[in-house]
């Protein structure tokens, strides 16, 4: 079974802090994704990466950055946390098959609260 | 711009088949139908996908109408652990992001 592991299930940080969310997958997937999920707004893509050191902006990249130094690890960084970044953050990974969409496999999420 | 329409909630008796409908009347020829579910406090879980033929795997069956404007996810013998929000999504063959709508809350009751 594919395993996508997110470093924390719950996290509480203060406004202005730099926050790191870590994600590791064990299936040698090329693609990795960061989403946030909010009630009434559904799932929204922040960033994705299709290879080491490569990244693409999703729909809501403002206030976030990412890092992918190794194939299995994808980090989401909140440069200066704000209260409107309180949310559930979900990491996902998938194979890449000639660019065609492949099912994404998700971690269990990090519920981040910014006070 | 919703591409799929699902009922907000459904109930199903434990051990019976759960049939979850989805309308996707504007689907285009290169778009697949995908189903995911999200159990409370967990991340979304991939279930099944299809283009135009019916599909079956160890979790579920997917029935797509001939005109591809609607589909039905079938859980053949629902259990209490199948209680979750089920999302029907259409994705381009070379798309790379998921957009979840509100989904259907399935409650399996004993």
Image: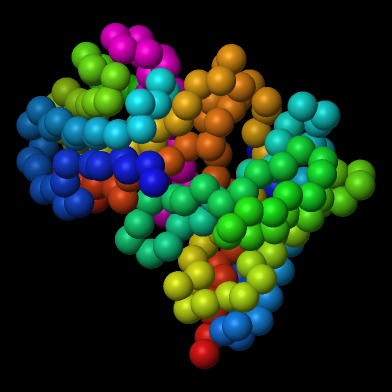
Whether A10 is drawn above or below A46: the answer is below
Residue placed at 38% from the left, 64% from the top?
B40
- Residue A5: x and y in percent read 25, 42
A58 within the magenta span: yes
Q: Which residues are magenta?
A: A37-60
Question: How many discs appear?
Answer: 0
At horizontal 77% and vertical 46% (from top left) the residue drawn is B24
Q: Is residue B110 above or below residue A85?
A: below
Residue B31 is covered by the magenta coloring: no
Report which quarter residue A51 is drawn in.
top left
Residue A71 picture quarter = top left
- Is residue B25 rendered to the left or right of residue A27? right
Q: Quadrant of residue A32?
A: top left
User: Is residue A80 at all visible to an observer of this figure?
Assistant: yes
Q: Nearer the viewer, residue B56 or A103?
A: B56
**Relative height, residue A46 to residue A86 (above, below):** above
Position in image of residue B1 (x %, y %): 66, 38
Q: Nearer the viewer, residue A50 or A20?
A: A50
Residue at x 20% of width, y 51% of height: A9
Q: Residue furthest top?
A: A53
Residue in front for this viewpoint, A38 or A83:
A38
């Amino acid at each position: 079974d594919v395993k996508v592991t997110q470093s924390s299930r719950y996290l509480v940080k203060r406004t202005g802090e730099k926050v790191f969310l870590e994600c590791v997958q064990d299936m040698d997937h090329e693609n990795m994704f960061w989403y946030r999920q909010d009630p009434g707004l559904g799932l929204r893509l922040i960033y994705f990466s299709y290879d080491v050191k490569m990244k693409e902006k999703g729909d809501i990249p403002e206030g976030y950055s990412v890092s992918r130094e190794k194939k299995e690890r994808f980090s989401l960084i909140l440069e200066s946390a704000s209260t409107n970044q309180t949310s559930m953050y979900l990491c996902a990974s998938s194979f890449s098959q000639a660019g065609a969409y492949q099912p994404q496999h998700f971690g269990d999420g990090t519920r981040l609260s910014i006070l | 711009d919703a591409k799929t329409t699902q009922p907000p909630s459904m109930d199903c008796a434990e051990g019976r088949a759960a049939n979850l409908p989805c309308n996707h009347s504007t689907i285009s020829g290169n778009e697949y139908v995908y189903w995911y579910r999200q159990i409370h406090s967990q991340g979304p879980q991939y279930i099944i996908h299809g283009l135009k033929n019916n599909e079956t795997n160890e979790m579920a069956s997917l029935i797509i109408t001939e005109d591809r404007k609607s589909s039905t996810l079938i859980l053949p013998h629902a259990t209490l652990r199948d209680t979750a929000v089920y999302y029907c999504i259409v994705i381009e063959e070379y798309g790379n992001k998921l957009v979840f709508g509100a989904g259907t809350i399935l409650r399996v009751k004993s």
